[in-house]
Amino acid sequence: MPVQQRLSFRSLLWLVVFTLPVNLLAETHKHVKHKHWTKKYDRYFKKNTKHYFGPGFDWHWFKAQGIAESRLNPKAKSRAGAIGIMQIMPRTYKEIIKKQPNLGRIEEPRWNIAAAIYYNRQLYKRWQKRQVPSDDRLEFTFASYNAGFTRVLKALKKARESQKLPPEEAKKWEKISPYTPPETRHYIRRIDSLMQVEASQGKSG
């Protein structure tokens, strides 16, 4: 390979190896309210958060979830087949449609976001019934959205058994987190980092 070509290749490799991660890292530290993130879909996050969680709940949590899922890309599609901003699986959407028949096509951002927040609400209520503290309930909800309710429930049981914790002590995200998949732990950290300013103020308001 000629010297000039080798240099070009090395330059390109440097850009890929060093510049791209730096850009991604910079993006990771941009708060959910930063201008970097489009406000195009904010009205859908606001409307559906108010509808399913009440007016006092901070809708930015679900926008942060959308960023973690797809960087708010309505055309995103995962290898597993998850679709849209909130990366909903078609089979999950079909189940949601049975209870929310007014929803439209999964590819449309307004319905994709509405379905995801509705689904989050169902997961949230399941953890509420299991008396997970309100300060941890949203982490349990997002973890279930990412890994599945059953897998998080298994992590809860494993944490309780492995650490010999009282039932109530085990119902904290920091206690069960090590027993969830690495991808799920990263997912929760990503959402929390996007909400860093409000994170210390609780999950609502």
Image (cartoon, rainbow, N blue to C red):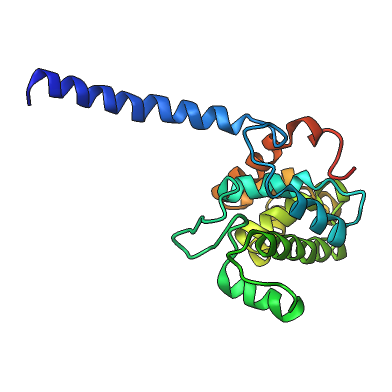
Q: Check the image and name the residue furthest to the bottom.
A: 98
Residue at screen point 73% across, 65% down: 119
On screen, residue 152 above or below 14? below
Left or right relative to 204: residue 68: left
Q: Which part of the image, by quadrant, shows the C terminus?
A: top right
The image quarter in which residue 151 lies? bottom right
Q: Check the image and name the residue furthest to the left.
A: 2
Q: Which part of the image, by quadrant, shows the N terminus?
A: top left
Q: Position of residue 49 (x, y in %)?
A: 82, 55
The image quarter in which residue 27 lies? top right
Q: Position of residue 162 (x, y in %)?
A: 68, 52
Residue 164 shows in this picture: no
On screen, residue 149 above or below 26? below
Residue at screen point 58% across, 45% down: 71
Residue at screen point 64% across, 63% down: 148
Left or right relative to 83: residue 51: right
Q: Position of residue 124 (x, y in %)?
A: 80, 60
Left or right relative to 36: residue 127: right
On screen, residue 161 above or below 39? below
On screen, residue 30 above or below 96? above
Left or right relative to 62: residue 73: left
